[in-house]
Image (spheres, helix red, strand yellow):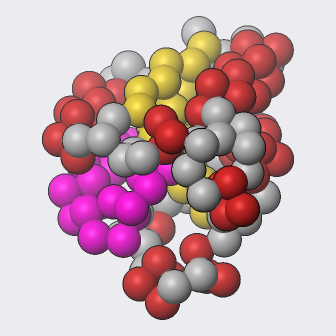
Amino acid sequence: MSSILLLHGPNLNLLGQREPAIYGSHPLADYVKVVRVLAEDRGWVVEDLQSNHEGDLVEAIHAARGCHDVIIINAGALTHYSWSIHDALAAFEGPVIEVHISNPHARESFRRVSVVEPQATCTIAGLGLRGYEIATRVATTRSSQR
């Protein structure tokens, strides 16, 4: 069975509470559910992890090698400076889909740089829950190539 590793970085555990004008009112569980339901409808399984610790995410990416087919990642603030996540993703052989709830390009200038993007098959940003649905559709389409 094909599988997706869904990763969420720092502070995303506060979705629905933190800056709802930017991130909306949905809790993290809603984002995970959107991915899980759509993926399972397509015959895929989903493992998810949220961590406020960079090393946990790096270790999850390492463990995904040979275990998961696709990674969907919202690295949160780590998107902008985590070269360790960048390097870990480089060692993953499957597609990587970068997703953001808000549009980093419409926000502060430091958010416009993503060190995840060079390792990603595609980036989906600014579409909230719909972005996670699109990411899952891309992930579960066999033509997704890195």
- 86 in magenta: yes
In the rendered image of this protein, does residue 53 appear above or below residue 20?
Answer: above
Placement of the N terminus among the 4 image quadrants: top right
Residue 48, visible in the rendered structure: yes
Q: Nearer the viewer, residue 76 or 140?
A: 76
Specify the quadrant of the image occupied by residue 83: bottom left
Q: Residue furthest bottom?
A: 109
Magenta part mainly helix, strand or loop?
helix
The residue under the point 49% across, 19% down is 47
The magenta region covers 74-93
Q: Nearer the viewer, residue 30 or 62?
A: 30
Measured as percent of width and height from the top left, residue 10 is found at 37, 47
Measured as percent of width and height from the top left, residue 3 is found at 55, 20
- 125 in magenta: no
Measured as percent of width and height from the top left, residue 26 is found at 72, 38
Q: Nearer the viewer, residue 26 or 77?
A: 26
The residue under the point 48% across, 24% down is 48
Left or right: 137 as drawn, with respect to 29 = right
The residue under the point 30% across, 41% down is 52
Please tell me how many numbered marks the rendered image carries: 0
Measured as percent of width and height from the top left, residue 140 is found at 71, 32
Left or right: 27 as drawn, with respect to 96 = right
Residue 95, visible in the rendered structure: no
In the rendered image of this protein, does residue 33 appear above or below residue 72?
Answer: above
Left or right: 81 as drawn, with respect to 136 = left
In the rendered image of this protein, does residue 131 appear above or below residue 56?
Answer: below
